Amino acid sequence: MMLVFPQDSNLTKHTNLPDLPACFQLSVLPWTPCIFLWLASPFYILYLKRNNRGYIMMSILNRIKTVLGLILWIVCWTDLFSSFHEMSQNQSKPPIYFVTPLIVGMTMLLATFLIQYERLKGVQSSGVLFIFWTISVLCAIVPFRSKILSLGSEGNGVEDKLRFTMFYIYFGLTLIQLILSCFNEKPPLFSSVVTDPNACPEITAGFLSKMTFWWFTSMAIKGYKSPLENKDLWSLNKQDSSELVVPNLLNEWEVEKSKAQRNSVFVNPEEEEEEEEVLLSKRKEVRQPSFLRALLRAFGPYFLIGSAFKLLQDLITFVNPQLLRLLIDFTKQTNAPLWWGYSLAFLMFGTSLLQTLILHQHFQYCFVTGMRLRSGIIGAIYRKALAITNEAKRSSTVGEVVNLMSVDAQRFMDLTTFLNMLWSAPLQIILALFFLWQVQRHTFQYIYTLPLPSVVQTIIIFIQNVWQCKYQIQSMILGFGFFQHIIIYMRLFAYLWCGNCFIKAIRHNLVTRDLFTVQHGFSYLIAYKSVYVQCHVMWLSACHVINGVCVQGINLSGGQRQRVSLARALYSEVDVYLLDDPLSAVDAHVAKHIFDNVIGPEGALKGKTRILVTHGISFLPQVDNILVMVDGRVSEMGSYQDLLKQNGAFAEFLRNYSLEDIIEVDEVTVSLVDEEEEEEFPEDALSNHTDMVDNEPVVNEARRQFMRYTLSSQDVCVLCVLQVKFKVYWEYAKAVGPFLSLFICFLYGCQSAASIGANFWLSEWTNDAQHNRTQEQVSMRVGVYAALGISQGVLVMFSSFTLALGKIQAARKLHQTLLDNKFHTPQSFFDTTPIGRIINRFSKDIYVIDEVLPSTILMFLGTFFASLSTMIVIICSTPIFALVIGPLALIYFFVQRFYVATSRQLKRLESVSRSPIYSHFSETITGTSVIRAYGRNAAFVLMSDMKVDENQKSYYPGIVSNRWLGVRIEFIGNCIVLFAALLAVIGKDKLSPGLVGLSVSYALQVTMSLNWMVRMTSDLESNIVAVERVKEYSETQTEAPWIVTDKQPPPDWPPKGNVEFVDYSVRYREGLDLVLRNISLKVEGGEKIGIVGRTGAGKSSMTLCLFRLLEAADGEIVIDEVKISEIGLHDLRSKLTIIPQEPVLFSGTLRMNLDPFEKYSDEEVWKALELSHLKRFVSNQTSKLDLECSEGGENLSVGQRQLVCLARALLRKTRILVLDEATAAVDLETDDLIQSTIRTQFEDCTVFTIAHRLNTIMDYTRVLVLDKGQIAEFDTPTNLMAQKGIFYGMAKDAGLA
């Protein structure tokens, strides 16, 4: 001010009643809001044109604002016309009296126009006009006061009554406009607010409410009063939903791909070699599309708004240090007017408040960008998973792809928060160094006249300001992992750029899998419109079917799953059905029932084209045409009778493998399943199932976090609302190490003590100048200060190092405990727990424990000790400040409680809704072929989008709660700054400048410390839940001990292989019906026992009992005089071998799958492959035994996988062998070879075979027939046939009787 109006310096500054010059009041002050509005209007109008929200009806509020705007215009131009009138009366007036009313009047017309234009574009509350009216009122306050002062000083009254009156009318109307702009208009016609019963209040919130996040208060109160439920969450804003976000990203990605294709030159592969070489030599390098560019175009513009806020906040950050310097200068001047100090104190408060509002707007934009980024990436990955080719799909495991969605998408979201720190942190450091350089330059000019501590005092202000950036820079370093994010980006790009599923023209009429030989061609089905597939891979989605189906139908037997899959195909009502061996997993009588009632000539599909691939031969006489395939080629084709007459390979095959003479079509007897059997089909369909949470692990009933599915009409999410117990913290402390935990806290306390000591020492040093002691004890001052600084650095290093050690130890210990427990968890747990929930524990929760929780603890300890240090320093400087702490602490406590209660529940709701995303995704990957074949891509994409949006519904209030908290807590911090400055002004005569600087600079830091401390407290409570969840799954009920030392059987046990069931009963889980009832039988060593029965009779359950996957409810199983319930599970299972119904292979080499522990030589492995009829296939592979098996062995056919399991069994060759429908998926010829191998190689072994093909067990020692969990028949096949009981009926259905 002194530079502009030097003659008025006494009027403006050096007086107890300051005022501004009249010229300034007539020009700069009224022009300031006008300049703002004219500069902002073009951009604002353009924004409104592009973002039309609808039409708002004219309301009373709108009419009043419009009328007031017009009156303001009239008032301004009254001044203008008054000036013209005075000029006509020869009263000369300065140009300012014409220019200012003209500019202000036109600005009022512009404001009135904007009021109406906003109404037409559906704006309920205007930020631009609110800022305009606020600046107008603030700028009018000075002349308002000046006119009152001049009125009091002049005894003659007011000279220019018209302008005096017009100004106060102007001020009053402007103030009313400001108040009215705080109120909202009604929502636009047909907006989502009207149609959505639970719309987010942000849509209708006013400008002030949005800036302070006041609209979130209702949820904070609700969360504090009662547990938040899913129904309490607001609908997701339309612009944040997957419906808009994902297509936007995919469109940009398509643009990128099309650009890449346009810029690439492709060579025609059919050209001649010479021409091809010429073309190749001139070929441009193929340009890869940039997924990053697609992300930037899709989300960049919105993110840049947040970056603009960050830039503004960074610049404002350096205002307060300058004000603090002026405040310190003020305390040095004894005659300075007090209003200087009060003005500086309130300016610091206002600057801090503005900085708070701008910073949290920046964070809001960043987090919303991250949220949209995550939705977009998840949507893109999901859609890609449905379109990817099988070849590309085999290049990555299901786990790796799920990892892209669960971890990598999350990291991309986290990256947006810290992305601005790439330029913001260097900018802040450069600005700080610039100010330091200015101070240093100024110091060198007066090096001989200025005492060193005064220089240090000035420098420390800026140094301490740089420390305000400490937490942001620390966060950037913790969350940066820049190279890590580059790797994640490359993984996402690689997945999204890999091959899509395509349709290839088929030159021949039809290509199917070899009817009688294990082949691998039919897995790649081409699904045309109106063509549906009933796939051999019996895939089920996790959904409610009748009583409910577990993830991927894990709680259904193979036959039940096959029938559900058939039913799905049946109700599709299409023209052509491709049926890939749907009868392999069901018993003969069930297969007959399905064929007769569904597939056959008189079945439900009669009149439709049915292409059936089958290994069975009993139904061939009833089909219209038969294609015989050998080595991928059609060898014969014709009707059943035609092929018999040709007497070719087909007829030869039938002579070899049909157990009775070839029968004519008219001699085929068609018998229906009796009424009793028909009734049992629907009844046993889901007999093994109960609700999803029957076996949910419960450490403490009150701590159950949620139920995925409900049993009754109470459709509520049971959510833990208790505070996280101290026990959970203690568990984590124990994992870190109790002594190490205490030592870490001690180091942080020492670090803060050293910091306070150094700053107090510096403060005392600066006071030496007042007592002319600057030249004394310089070495001592520097030495102590250096020692304190070095010790602080050493303590920081040691505390960080010990915390890093502790976090690694805790993460390793908790993960190992979880892994050990899950390896020893009973089968029933996996039957009843969704796979997504288990994946969530091993991915998200372990990630939180490994990376998020340690950084949260680090920040919590840092902010806690920083806040504590601030209070200590301010109270030591100005003891009266202790009176202010009470009320502020009370407000702080209530805000913190409201936030923590709500935030914790939102975090848990978000965690609950996250698991279904991953479960659904892993199911989708498994069942991709079925989804494509049924043409259900769009439905599943919609389902995935809905699950993501449901998750974001709880995530969005979570991030807003942080902003809501930040504004309020930082307001408390700003109040601390205000009171510290005011108290410094009041007690300036008693305080040294050093203490004032120290006290206020600490107060400036406490704003961020308090905010971060509350958030870290909440984050700690929210993230420690990961420890609770991992501990919960680490303490679930385990199986029996792996080894029982005092009950270990001899090494050669069992010597004979005798097996005896003694009054044996078993159930799947507590509370369920028995699946086996009072089974008593004795099997001698070396006997071959066939087990048959209808679906759900308990056949597989009986074999599970041998391995103790199911524990006995009553009775015993004795193997060679050893009760299996008394010995360790490892001792038992290592002596038994099973070839399961569904072959299991792991990602890795074939050698590893056959001999994981490398116990056998290559010769033994090749021998096993030869006996299992795989030697020819493996030897034809280039990598031989090192053939890489994809996840689940998907690059092998089902039959080949089964043969690998047989080879595995041949290698182990234990005394007892169990075959659980092991040959259901192989053709008859291979089945015959397998059976002959079993008879020769396992001649002296006890063999239990669950069989659907009864011909495979007709030469067995005895056959056990189960019915409803009880022994119905048990005798030799010959005797059972003679009895004409159940077994006879099954044999008759299979064409064996």
Image (spheres, helix red, strand yellow):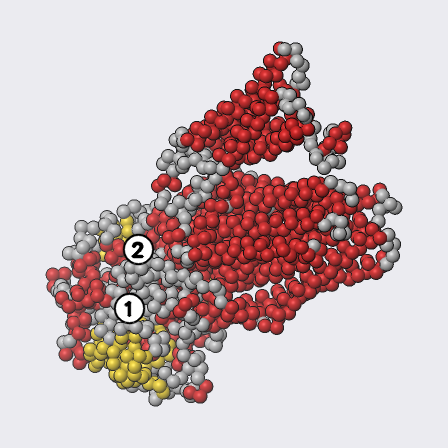
SS assignment at label 1: loop
Residue 15 percent across, percent down from the top left: 74, 36
- Disc 2 to disc 1, C-alpha distance: 35 Å
The residue at 17%/60% (across/down) is 596
According to the picture, the residue beneath numbered tag 1 turns out to be 688
Report the quarter where the N terminus lies: top right
Give the residue drawn at x 64%, y 24%: 157
Residue 102 shows up from this direction: no
Residue 597 pos. (x, y %): 17, 59
> On the rendered structure, is 742 left or right of 777?
left
- Residue drawn at 42 percent across, 75 percent down: 1038
Q: Identify the image quadrant of residue 439.
A: top right
Position of residue 1226 relative to residue 23, above or below, is below
Residue 955 lies, with reference to residue 208, above or below; the image says below
Q: Is residue 1105 left or right of residue 728?
A: left
778 or 1253: nearer the viewer: 778
Q: Earlier in the sequence, mark 2 or mark 1?
A: 2
Relative side of 126 to 1106, left or right:
right
Vertical order, 340 against 596 (above or below) = above
Q: Which residue is under mark 2?
A: 512
User: At label 2, which amino acid type do we have?
Assistant: Thr
Q: Quadrant of residue 672?
A: bottom left
Q: Nearer the viewer, mark 2 or mark 1?
A: 1
The residue most toward the left is 666
